[in-house]
Image (cartoon, rainbow, N blue to C red):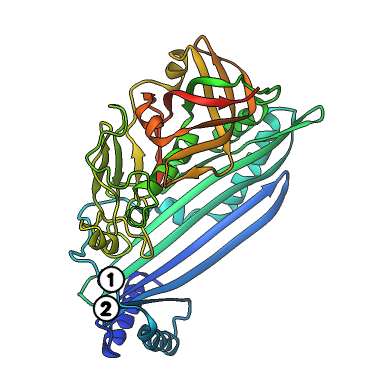
Amino acid sequence: MDEREAIEVARSVVAFATQRGADAAEATVAISRRFHVEAREKIISKLEHSTGKSLNVRLFSGGRKVALASSDFSVSGMRAAVVRSLDQAHFVAVDAFCGLPEGCGRFEGDLSLYDSAVADRDDAAKVDDALEMERLIRDADPRIVNSAGSHYSDTRSILALANSDGFAQTYTGTHASRSTSPVAQEGNVKRTAHYGTAARFASGLDPNDLVARTAARRTVEMFGARKPPTGRMAVIFERDIAAAVLHDLFSALNAGNVAVANSWLGGRVGDRVGSDLVTLVDDGTMPGRLGSSPFDGEGVPTRRTVVFERGTLKTFLFDAYYARKLGSKTTGNSTGGGIGANNFYLEPGSQTLEALVAATPHGILVLDTIGFATEHATGTYSRGARGFMIENGELSHPVDEFTIAGSFPEMLAGIDGIANDLRFDGSIVSPSFRVAEMTISGN
């Protein structure tokens, strides 16, 4: 199915729904061709090549909303699903805030979402990637004795959206990734780690040898780790872990959570929350980025939204429903079933991570976190962690089995250094950053 066929399916479903009495309707068609290979040592342990398709429909009738999802693209199947859904609408409560968004359209500009080098790459070369990474991690260090798998994946996807207000648009994108997870053993101690790379364009991926070397180094460098002392000290979050911190922060910026009092940021728009270094942006219009798209899950054009500016909270992130409910405007962050990130990131600084470490007399570089202990309503943050002790501006020894704790207001206000190592390998990304002081629970 190509773009033309996908948009025609969406249009036909919308037309049928309005003929059957829907006040408004929206249909989204998604088609994905996916390849995935996993290698373990010299063996291909998993090989998948599939094409998936889905139809998601939202129907509005008498102030009520119903939704359906199906993979049945037959005319009879789609029409039967619409009829059933409209019948079920009679049992749904009236909601004054539901409905199609105002101002549908698409970002006008070349977003560079499609790479023929990804879409047309030979499958045998993809298999070779996974096998080569397996060989390279073992060649990197004799202590690496196994792996949890080396992977190559790519996807070519088509998305088409049409609604009863006359909006009908489609786009095609690509996505590719490489990753590996070595297992190392020294005596009776085993260590594992992971490293991966992802991009829309093949040229944006880290090469196999860099992926393998980085994963191998992360695995073996933790041998000899011990608990750090308990106390208050500086904490540097390496960029991958910094991105995980931003994932938690995004939940507090989600207008859906704000509306049900499940966000510590509720009622704080206009307040100074973070340090001067904290500028957070959500931008769906960045060419070639994984989170970019010409329109969001409701057909609203994507845009650049400054969420925090020099520490001051400027806005939450909205879809059409919660924008109406909270008296605001959509920011183009609908996923079609909720609120999600486009390209959400912390603006980088000018210094390297190495320079940030060198400017830290006493602290910890966090390379991995464990567990789920974030309370979005109160802003409490607590994670198990592992990483490196920093003494006199140098990495002194690996540390493990400790907890870092604090609160998001304190963490944002305490950011006193941001590195320049931002990379856009996901929809929520961050450079490494330092918090001046957090609580460490170790020995």
Left or right: 362 as drawn, with respect to 258: right
Q: Amino acid at mark 1?
A: Cys
Q: Residue at x 81, y 30 (%)?
A: 188
- Secondary structure under the numbered disc 2 in the rendered image: loop
Q: Position of residue 376 (x, y in %)?
A: 43, 46
Q: Work out whether 380 lies above or below 18.
A: above
Q: Which residue is mark 1?
A: 98
Q: Work out whether 237 lies above or below 95.
A: above
Q: Position of residue 413 (x, y in %)?
A: 35, 28
Q: Work out whether 373 lies above or below 353.
A: below
Would you say the residues marked 1 and 2 are in contact, meaning their CB atoms lie under 8 Å apart? yes
Which quarter of the image is occupied by the C terminus?
A: top right
Q: Work out whether 218 lies above or below 63.
A: above
Q: Which residue is mark 2?
A: 63
Residue 163 figure quarter: bottom left
Q: Position of residue 265 (x, y in %)?
A: 33, 44
Q: Amino acid at mark 2?
A: Gly
Left or right: 382 as drawn, with respect to 436: right
Categorize mark 1 by other alpha carbons within 10 Å: few (<14), some (14-19), many (20+): some
Q: Residue at x 51, y 32 (%)?
A: 405
Q: Position of residue 287 (x, y in %)?
A: 30, 46
Q: Residue at x 44, y 44 (%)?
A: 248
38 and 105: which one is in front? 105
Q: CA distance from mark 1 to mark 2?
A: 7 Å
Q: Is residue 170 visible?
A: yes
Q: Earlier in the sequence, mark 1 or mark 2?
A: 2
Q: Is residue 125 visible?
A: no
Q: Residue at x 81, y 27 (%)?
A: 187
- Secondary structure under the numbered disc 1 in the rendered image: loop
